[in-house]
Image (cartoon, helix red, strand yellow):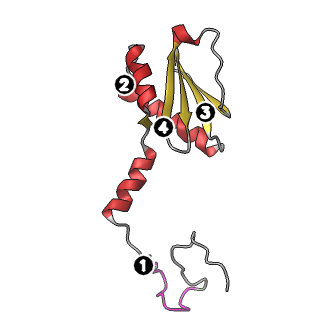
Amino acid sequence: MAALDHRILYRQPLIPGVGKAKPGSISQPTGQISGDSFQKILDQKSLKFSSHALQRLAQRNISLGEAELGKLNDAVDKAGRKGSKESLILMKDLALVVSVKNRTVITAVDGKALKDNVFTNIDSAVVITE
């Protein structure tokens, strides 16, 4: 039995006018995404913070605004496109270790604690400027 290619959502005839589709028409995919599935897709794109990361942010009096979260999200996307699994993200005087696969911030370190610090179990680093 031939393997099914799940990347193909629908097919259209290669030659217009041949096959079931009318020339110039596009076949529609048969499956629909349920509301729960769609929410899961949206949730995968947003960042989560581990309880450890939240504690570190609170202890170090670090707050992230909407702009910083957007830059952080972009950095995680960039690391993911390069195949990273665990990434160190440097933003201003803040370092964040992020599980790229789970889109979860694992820990946060501010500028004071960065001095002489060693980060382990990472496979990439992303530096955010501006």
Q: Is the magenta stretch mostly helix, strand or loop?
A: loop
Q: Give the mark nearer the N terminus: 3 vs 2.
A: 2
Q: Mark 3 or 2, which is nearer the eye?
A: 3
Residue 30 badge: 1
Q: Distance between the residues labelled 4 and 3?
A: 10 Å
Q: Give the mark nearer the N terminus: 2 vs 4.
A: 2
Read off the magenta span.
16-26
- Is disc 3 placed on a helix, strand or loop? strand
Residue 27 visible, this orientation: yes
Label 4 crowding class (10 Å Cα cut-off): few <14, some 14-19, many 20+? some
- Is disc 4 placed on a helix, strand or loop? strand
Residue at coordinates 42% horizontally, 42% vertically from top-left?
Answer: 46
Residue that badge 3 annotates = 87
Does 104 appear in magenta?
no
Horizontal placement of 37 versus 74: left or right? Answer: left
Residue that badge 2 annotates = 65
Residue 104 badge: 4
- Is disc 1 placed on a helix, strand or loop? loop
Residue 57: % across, % down: 41, 20
